[in-house]
Image (spheres, grey):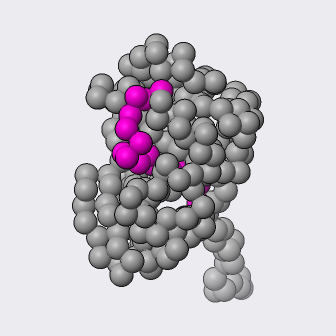
Amino acid sequence: MARHDNTIPKTKAAQAPDTRPTPLPQAWLDDIREAAAVIRRGGLVLMPTDTIWGIACDATNEEAVRRVFALKQREDGKALITLVDKAGLVSRFVERMPDVAWDLIELSDRPLTVVYDGARGLAPSLVAEDGSAAIRVTKEPFSRALCGRAARPLVSTSANISGQPAPRRFADIAQEVIDGVDYVCRSRRGEKQPARPSAIIRLGSGGEFKIIR
């Protein structure tokens, strides 16, 4: 008489999803290495970001920041945005990072620039008269990797002369801006999809916030 095996067959244990970042193309890595070297020397770089193309430099280097203002023909009183690659780095540049900031950064469905009170450790020209500074955590692979490679917070301001339209693609950038930087990134130049600027909020030390854009 045949015997029937009523035991439930063992199944393979469910595997955890692979959360490792996708490796960047070698051409991007070469581009990032060259751009980071220019930034560390105090130079200006034209780079793709998580929003529109931007002019970047070391955000702790006052001389480099002043070159950005001069290139954009922008008044010093209009502070620029600082870009970092990790949310944990924001606290290095503000006296107090409200708890709600972590949720806002993580849950925002578009790039989010936050204006924080009590800025510190940045070039003086990046700090507004009231002591605040605008900082964004980039999640876009190229700009995030460049921040990490340069090992510095980066100025990230639209690649246009003040008063002129912000470029939504690389092809929209004026030659005057291209000629005014020390290095122009090669990556992502051919993208056709128009980009848009980040959302901006003002976040108080007590967690209260105001939508600016």
Q: Which residues are magenta?
A: 71-87
* Residue for point 67% across, 78% down: 9
Is 190 left, or right, of 202 in this rendering?
right
Q: Can you see residue 194? A: no
As displayed, is residue 145 above or below residue 105? above
Residue 151 pos. (x, y %): 71, 51
Residue 17 pos. (x, y %): 61, 63
Is 184 left, or right, of 13 in this rendering?
left
Q: Which quarter of the image is occupied by the N terminus?
A: bottom right
> Is 211 in the magenta?
no
Residue 138 pos. (x, y %): 51, 51
Q: How many marks?
A: 0
> Is 84 in the magenta?
yes
Q: Can you see residue 30? A: yes
* Residue for point 60% across, 38% down: 64
As displayed, is residue 90 above or below residue 200? below
Residue 107 pos. (x, y %): 39, 65
Choose between 172 and 72: the one closer to the eye: 72
Choose between 143 and 5: the one closer to the eye: 143
Is 95 left, or right, of 105 in this rendering?
right
As displayed, is residue 131 above or below residue 167? below
* Residue for point 66% across, 68% down: 15
Q: Quadrant of residue 132?
A: bottom left
Residue, far top: 175
* Residue for point 46% across, 15% down: 176
